[in-house]
Image (spheres, grey):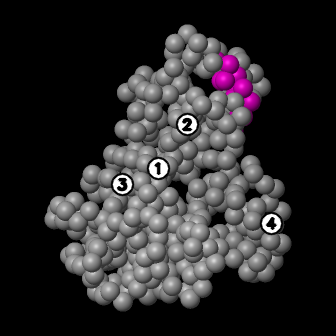
Amino acid sequence: MISRTIYKEILDTISNKAVTVITGARQVGKTTLCSWIEKELKFNYVSLADPIIRNAAKNDPSEFLSLNPFPLIIDEIQKAPELFDYLEGIVDKEIKKGNKKGLYVLTGSQAYKLMKGVNESMSGRVGLVSMSPLSLSEINGKEENPFCVDIKRINCRINDYSIETRKMYDYITRGFYPELYDNPSLKASVFYADYVETYIERDVTDFITLKDKQKFINLMTILASLTGQELIYDNLAKIIGVDVKTIQSWVSVLIAGNIIYLLQPYNEESMVKQVTKRSKIYFCDTGLACYLARVNTTDALISSYLKGHMVETFIINEIIKSYKNNRVDKESSFYYYRNSNQEEIDLIINRDGKLTLLECKSGEEYSASDVSSFDNLEKTKLKIDNNAIICTTKTIYSIKKGVYVIPFTAI
């Protein structure tokens, strides 16, 4: 069983909040962590994925909660939103008695519906934890800290942690869902075929009525080939054959299901006229993106035009996971930069008023000319920390003052 970095953060939240809400995409491991909580903290457990239990919760929420007392884990709670108002009453009553922590753990794969219920009923009493698929550090049993370009720490880390470049592509194409590592003989293509079908049948149809399921799948496929690129709704509408509002609605559904996320462009007041205003799209899991884009073998990816974008997606995902898994993602902001001259910075991290500028590459040898776009932020009002190109190099080297080339295992 792979140890999850975020588990300690979940336990900390339970010990400080009346209600802990765990969100994350289907199959990221929420139910597994709930089983750990059930055993370690002696919580009761119910899953609303079971239609009989779900009907009982929907038909008589008060009786359901009476028969399933706290401390209680309710898995897939968004399937019975009727419970939220009744939970609010119980939580309020217990807080007045002095019971202010560890009452309920609520999980769900549909972040929008889950948080809508929480915000309308229990805002202020809830600790929110967002789960991602496995990180490379978790798979390899390495300590996971929020990434920063700390050369001393990176040197210590990579001394006993090296992954061959081809193995990196293996990870990218296989993806990072726990079941793929719990069951190494499971073919990734079989897993993702089932995943897409289940996601559309159980999650997407809860949000929207799909008149043409194939067009939605076509959108997912096209977006997979666009991971790491700007999102242009008009172009997608023309390709798919639906209107722009439909594309926007479907993209929102994919975001709510933690299938994709949008990286916003960075700008300051002095730059606002120079930078692009479009978001960039990234898949939350490279394995799913590779499956949809039909580059789901290592050799196919290495020879594909998508190689660079998949590597970029992989690296940025790993960085964001390192923040989410330590629950400091809300204290940090992530952006990209592109100006009217098409000069780009793949990732900008703003943490504690300091910027880190990062390029994500699939090669090994780079020079100062490869980060010339960094100069566009020389006039920033914020302090700039050490910056880096993250790539497949095995050694660390400097290419200019404060800019280093570092291995992807440094994350």
Q: Which residue is mark 3?
A: 146
* Whether label 4 touches label 3, CB < 8 Å: no
- Tag 3, which secondary structure? loop
- The image quarter containing residue 52 is top right
| Placement of 167 over or under 284, stated as above or below | below
The residue carrying pointer 3 sits among few (fewer than 14), some (14 to 19) or many (20 or more) residues within 10 Å by Cα, namely some
Q: Which of these two is toward me, 131 or 270?
A: 270
Q: Which residue is mark 4?
A: 246
Q: Earlier in the sequence, mark 3 or mark 1?
A: 3
Residue type indicated by callout 3: Pro
Q: Earlier in the sequence, mark 2 or mark 1?
A: 2
Look at the image and give the residue range highlighted in magenta: 79-90
Which numbered mark, 2 or 1, is in the foreground of this view? 1
Q: Which residue is mark 1?
A: 331
Which numbered mark, 4 or 3, is in the foreground of this view? 3
Which numbered mark, 2 or 3, is in the foreground of this view? 3
Q: Which residue is mark 2?
A: 21
Q: Residue at x 52, y 71 (%)?
A: 336
The residue carrying pointer 2 sits among few (fewer than 14), some (14 to 19) or many (20 or more) residues within 10 Å by Cα, namely many
Image spot of residue 89 (x, y percent): 68, 19
| Placement of 126 over or under 91, stated as above or below | below
- Tag 2, which secondary structure? strand
Magenta stretch: residue 86 in it? Answer: yes
How far apart are the two marked residues, 4 and 2, measured between alpha carbons?
30 Å
- Count of all numbered marks drawn on residues in the image: 4
Residue type indicated by callout 1: Glu
Q: Which of these two is toward me, 192 or 283?
A: 283
